[in-house]
Amino acid sequence: MAQLILFVSAFTFLYLPTLLGYNLVFGKGKILHFGHGALGLVASYGLWTIFVQFHVPFLLSALFAFCIVTAAALLLAWLSLRLEPDGLGVMSIALHLAVLAVVLNWQSVTRGALGIPQIPRPDFMGDLPSFTLVVGIVGTLWAVGIWLLNRSSFGRALEALAEHPWHAGALGISRRRIHSIAFVIAGLGAFVSSIFFPMYLRLLSPSDYGFSAMIFYVLVVVAGGPGRVWSVVTAAFFLTFLREGIRFVRLPADMIGPAQLILFGLILFAAVWWRRKSIFPPQREV
Amino acid sequence: MLQLFANALIAGSLAALIAGGLALVYGTLGVFNLALGQMVLVGGYATWWLYQIAGLSLVISIFGGLAAGALVSWLAFEVFIRPFYKLHRFLPLVTTIALSMMLDGCILLAFGERPKGILPGAKQMMEVAGARISVEQLIMITITVLGLVCFAHVLHATAIGRRIRAVVQHDHAAMSLGIPALTLHRIVFILSGVLAACGGIYMGIDTTLTPTIAFSITIKAYAAIIAGGKGNFWGAIFCAYLIALLEQLLVGVHWFGTFYVPAGYQQTVALLFIIVLLVVKPSGLFTSTSRTA
């Protein structure tokens, strides 16, 4: 049991930067964006392909990954300004699928569906407790940073834009600037998570970045309360525990995946039902 | 080249069936249904089960598949759409993601991951204007075209079609004239489910059904309706065929006489094309303007 809790904690902490980044865009900003998985893919493959496959020094690889994930985040921000919300929702999924298809098919560089094995982990994070401690510190610092950001003028501007873009614009809030910053922070979160996640598994696999991962982000944000920080962190712990804990239920191996899907579908539906008036709240009128 | 056009016609007919119903749903309700691909699979798998396992005749199995599609879409409307779409039109986008997960799980539990074909075995091929096409494909293209013609007649030349178009243009104004908008919303949603099930049956007969294809079907259908101008029925049909043609041309043409694009990129480039198109023209190719008082 202690091992399971440690394992779930490690998983939750390493997911926190990307989850809270997504929460900023989808939860706080109410930007109907379902392409966050594409940012994770770009960051992970940008970093680990260059580092493991082409033996470029880690810092240079990280810098490269950071640059391309920022560019991808800015592209999504630009699409959010250009397209209507529901168009962005569907097109961001399309972008995610397109990036995934490139990863799966560009086998000479990415090794396709096999993924990239032998991702190194530093010695000081060699065992599970020390790894959990490091990602715990990083995850907590990230959560505190996002919480402070939410309470800053940037957070209020993002919230104002989510509620009424015209009125916010009339108050001098630049939608272009705020959306770009929100997407870049989300990209940075994806970048931080993509450093630790393959390191933990010692494998970079495209199956970890499929649309089911994206659905998990949506589930955590909706269940936790869109835009909130600490309740999303709690939801992340709970849902990760549920997701990993179901593996220990005595079910035939081929039933675990479908059972997870049905269970998470029910939780997502229940969460939307519970929060149906607050996920996309109606505009306040004076 | 003719073979590529024939392939595009086959794939486009399947996509048009699905996207057409969706365009109407978007026009009348203003909502997206991300469980559409799963509804396609429900129709296909139900037909497969009735024909291959229950041993019923193909015609009865097809009607059974269509009924299963209608039933699931009706339940989806009552549980996952109706309680939410008046609160905010984006809520069903999230609730239908939940529905898609549940349907995916149920399909995987009931039918497993292995591909299933309604009519397995070699197809009877024939040559039409230099392109090789199976009898089943020819029948399905004909049925799709006939179905679309019938649909056009209902939509543009009957009382119920006029009511649907009135609700598409302005549901509140239509309700004030005594048109039961909620009933029409329900009918249109179920109709889109039946068309999706029809697409699943088409796919199960032409190729095979696998649980993993649901999501790419949904996204391609939505790419067609967004690129066609949201809510524009004929724009969606046109773009469904256009995307299918692009996909075929992409992998079938020997580009610059030097290389072929690998088949794995077929969907990617079509989706990227739609994204580029939307960036240039965000309202889609055929924008339909609604009248205002």
Image: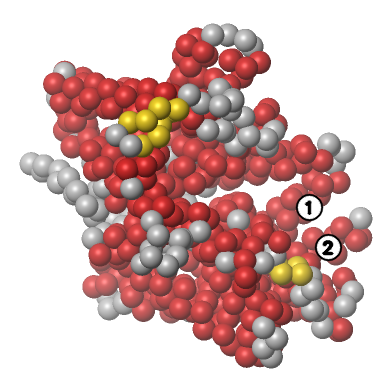
- In this orientation, which residue lies closer to the viewer: B59 or A9? B59
Q: Closest to the observer: A117 or B84?
A: A117
Q: Position of residue A242 (x, y in %)?
A: 75, 49
Q: For the point 87% across and 71% down, which residue is it?
A: A128
The x and y percentages for residue A247 are: 82, 47
> Reading the chain from its start, which is encountered first: label 2 or label 1?
2
Kindly state the secondary structure of the residue where label 2 is placed: helix
Q: CA distance from mark 2 to mark 1?
A: 9 Å
Q: Quadrant of residue B15?
A: top left
What count of labels does the image hold?
Answer: 2
* Residue B29 visible in the snapshot: no
Q: Which residue is mark 2?
A: A7
- The residue under the point 19% across, 48% down is B286
Towards the viewer: B1 or A202: B1
Residue B255: give x, y in percent of width and height. Answer: 38, 63
Residue drawn 24% across the image and 48% down it: B229
Residue A167: x, y in percent? 26, 67
The amino acid beneath tag 2 is Phe
Up/down of A34 relative to A153, above or below? above
Q: Quadrant of the C terminus of chain A?
A: bottom left
Chain to which the residue tagged by mark 1 belongs: A
Taking B178 as reference, is A93 above or below it? below
The residue that disc 1 covers is A244
